[in-house]
Image (spheres, rainbow, N blue to C red):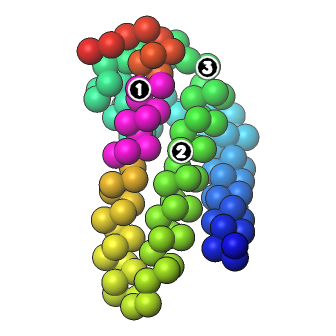
Amino acid sequence: MEEVIIFILFFLLVYGMYYLFVISRKKKLKQYYQSTEVRYLEMRYHIDLKDVPIQKLARTLAFANAVIISLTAWIASLLPNLILQLVVGFILLILFILIGYHFVGKYYQKKLGTKK
């Protein structure tokens, strides 16, 4: 039960920081369409995210990123050795990014009606 509470607190911390530093700042939000995350989704899933309101897109990706980072940190913290935590954490981070962005890409493909 303690691990679940730590996961939730870490998730809220990561999402809150993402919200404060990206979503709530108009200048950063305007540049969001040029971010690596958005370009990856557009190229990989052949979708035009310019049709999606920037606020909604930023919240969706903030949620996905918070889940990815929290889940990776939580699983890595269960391991006993620091070196093992770093190696497993890096591998899990890459894996969770690919899986999480796959779900986000498929969601927007379905929502925008583009399939390929």
Residue 108 is situated, as x and y percent measured from the top left of the image, at 47, 22
Q: Earlier in the sequence, mark 2 or mark 1?
A: 2
Contact, mark 3 vs mark 1 (Cβ under 8 Å) = no
Gap between marks 3 and 2 measured at Cα: 17 Å
Q: Which of marks 3 and 2 is nearer the N terminus?
A: 3
Q: Is the magenta stretch mostly helix, strand or loop?
A: helix
Label drawn at residue 106 = 1
Write the residue at 54% across / 39% down: 61
Label drawn at residue 53 = 3
Gap between marks 3 and 1 measured at Cα: 17 Å
The magenta stretch is 98-107
The kind of secondary structure element at disc 1 is helix
Q: Which residue bears the numbered disc 2? A: 64
Write the residue at 47% across / 11% down: 112
**Quarter of the rendering containing residue 86:** bottom left
In the image, 58 versus 22, the foreground residue is 58
Q: Earlier in the sequence, mark 3 or mark 1?
A: 3
- The mark closer to the camera, 3 or 2, is 2
Residue 2 to residue 82: above or below: above
- Res 10 visible: no
Label drawn at residue 85 = none
Q: In this view, does 73 lie to the left or right of 21?
A: left
